[in-house]
Image (cartoon, grey):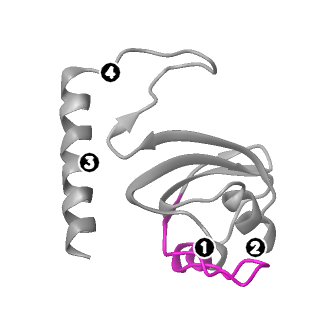
Amino acid sequence: MCCVYDYEKEYRVLLARRPDDNQLNTWARGVVLEDGYRTAPAQVRFASTSGKGAWVRVIMGEGCKRQIREIGSLLGLPVVRVLRVRIGTLRLGNLKPRQWRYLTTQEIADLRKLVTRNNKKTALA
């Protein structure tokens, strides 16, 4: 079973080869993983070429450890690199690995709204 959350995660993914439209559409619709779990639909867009490979932009509402790599492998698109760009409303920006920054007042307010909204959904369920 995979992790499902009420916020989006955005990634830049470097693939070892260039995907065709069919592979991107299949990824976007959802893929059945080896353990039988079917991934939720995602937004998958070609971004640019990189040598023999390509960068794609993936926006998911769920995500488990190594899920992007597993999907790429199943579709014949080996994943070279995965860069998380955004979680919910928080953008990584120019931060390097192991760097950090303080959240802005607006980011804190947006996170509070998200938590409040999710608590209301949980209470109604």
* Frontmost residue, 121 versus 95: 121
Disc with the residue nearer the chain's start (2 vs 1)? 1
Identity, as a three-letter code, of the amino acid under mark 1: Trp
Q: Nearer the viewer, residue 73 or 120?
A: 120
Q: Amino acid at mark 4?
A: Leu
Task: Give the alpha-carbon distance from disc 4 to disc 2, as whole Å.
Answer: 37 Å
Q: Quadrant of residue 50?
A: top right
Residue identifier under label 1: 27
Mark 4 or 2, which is nearer the eye? 4
**Which mark is on residue 115?**
3
Label 3 vs label 4: CA separation?
A: 16 Å
Q: Earlier in the sequence, mark 4 or mark 1?
A: 1
Q: Nearer the viewer, residue 19 or 63?
A: 63
Type of amino acid under label 3: Val
Which residue corresponds to the image point at 49% horizontal and 39% vertical from the top-left? 85
Q: Which element carries disc 1, helix, strand or loop?
A: helix
Mark toward the start of the polypeptide (1 vs 3): 1
Q: Which residue range is magenta in the image?
A: 24-45
Q: Nearer the viewer, mark 1 or mark 3?
A: 3
Query: Which sits earlier in the primary sequence, circle 3 or circle 2?
Result: 2
Residue 49 x %, y %: 66, 48
Q: Residue at x 44, y 41 (%)?
A: 86
In the picture, which quadrant includes the N terminus? bottom right
The residue indicated by pointer 2 is 75
